[in-house]
Amino acid sequence: VCDGDFGRSVTVDPGKPVTSLIGERLGVTISLNFWAILITYLLAIPAGVTSIGSEAFSGCANLTSITFPEGLESIYGYAFAYCDGLTSIEIPDGIKTLSDYAFRECENLKKVKTPIVWTPGSYSSAPDPLYGCVLKEFITSGEPTSIPAYMFYRAPYVELETIVIPETVTSIGSLAFSGSTKLTTLGIQGECE
């Protein structure tokens, strides 16, 4: 399978996860829609992949686990949308872009560990990387210094029971948790002042 737009190719054995990428430029991107390829259970994104393009794995309902490599910088819109087999994901700390709808409507996705690299909207239908998911646990990773206003204001955060915030956070924006009506545990790592 080749992606002529980017001059890159992907080696795929039907019925098996993608295991190797060949690229001509520095940094490799997965940017194909794999609707026709049966991806089951586990997916390990190979080392050297720096971004995952729009709709790359959208609709892979049997995908239950993803391992992202260190050095991954971007996951674009709808990359893993509608992957209903996912129950938890852990995004590497080095991520710089996590686009709107990247994990849209992964209906069984309940636990996420990720740096906050997007700006939340203040209204209920605002675009979000996790739009349409119903999360139970959100763990903030990386070294953020603040939690933005409205961060957990709307879906997918209204069912959150647990939020873990790292010790590097020194400020929390207005209405950051106002939509999380089922929140029972707010874990703040480190010392509180």
Image (cartoon, helix red, strand yellow):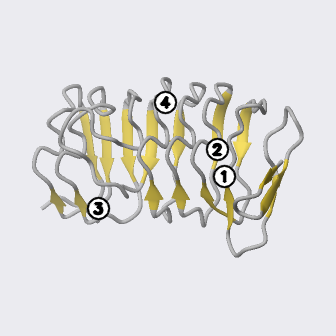
Q: Give the number of the mark in front: 3 or 4.
A: 4
Q: Quadrant of residue 97?
A: bottom left
Q: Residues within 10 Å of mark 3 (few under 14, many from 20)?
A: some
Mark 3 vs mark 2, CA separation in Å: 34 Å
Amino acid at circle 4: Leu
- Residue pictured at 53% horizontal, 59% vertical: 74
Amino acid at circle 2: Ala
Label of residue 31 in the image: 1
Q: Mark 3 points at which residue?
A: 167
Q: Quadrant of residue 24?
A: bottom right
Of pointers 3 and 4, the one earlier in the residue sequence: 4
Mark 4 vs mark 1, CA separation in Å: 23 Å
**Percent x, y of residue 55:** 59, 42
Mark 1 vs mark 3, CA separation in Å: 36 Å
Q: Name the residue under label 2.
A: 56
Amino acid at circle 3: Glu
Q: Which residue lies furthest to the bottom in this view?
A: 26
Of pointers 1 and 3, the one earlier in the residue sequence: 1
Secondary structure state at the residue bearing disc 2:
loop
- Residue pictured at 28% horizontal, 60% vertical: 190
Query: Contact (CB < 8 A) between labels 3 and 2?
Result: no
Whether residue 119 sits left or right of residue 15 in the image: it is left
